[in-house]
Amino acid sequence: MPVQVTTVMIGVEDLARSKKFYGEGLGCAIAQDYPNFVLFNMGEGSSSLALYEREAAAQDAGVSSEGSGFRGVSFHYIVSSKEGR
């Protein structure tokens, strides 16, 4: 069974501005909205787009957000349960 990328996450400097661009500018539907994270539903059969504050994303990845550390994008395969792997 092929694995599909379920979410593309982008680390952004200005979450509010990016949320406005993707939500209002491009018309993407917000699926989840948290203080440091926004998830957009990109349509049936598409991967989701997640925006995450760059500093928080780098911290989660265990690298520096400066220089050659965190590059600002990651790909995820998210399952609803352990059995879904």
Image (spheres, helix red, strand yellow):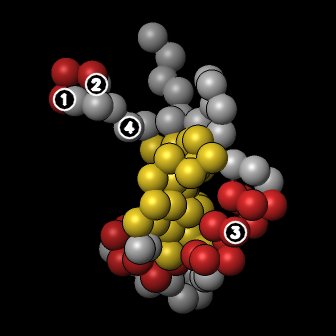
Residue count near mark 2 (Cα–Cα under 10 Å), binned few <14, some 14–19, many ≥20: few
Residue count near mark 4 (Cα–Cα under 10 Å), binned few <14, some 14–19, many ≥20: few
The residue at the point 48 percent across, 24 percent down is 3
Tell which tag, 2 or 3, sits nearer the viewer: 3
Position of the C terminus, as image quadrant, is top left
Q: Are marks 1 and 2 in contact (CB under 8 Å)?
A: yes
Instruction: Of the two numbered discs 1 and 3 on the same chain, state the one appearing first in sequence.
Output: 3
Circle 1 sits in a helix, a strand or a loop, which is it? helix
Number of the label disc, if any, that sits on residue 78: 4
Q: CA distance from mark 1 to mark 2?
A: 6 Å
Q: Residue furthest bottom?
A: 66
Circle 4 sits in a helix, a strand or a loop, which is it? loop
Percent coordinates x, y for residue 75 in the rendering? 52, 48
Number of the label disc, if any, that sits on residue 82: 1
Instruction: Of the two numbered discs 3 and 4 on the same chain, state the one appearing first in sequence.
Output: 3
Q: Is residue 30 above or below residue 15?
A: above
Q: Amino acid at mark 2?
A: Arg
Q: CA distance from mark 4 to mark 2?
A: 9 Å
Residue corresponding to mark 2: 85
The residue at the point 38 percent across, 37 percent down is 78
Q: Are marks 1 and 3 in contact (CB under 8 Å)?
A: no
Is 80 placed left or right of 5 in the picture? left
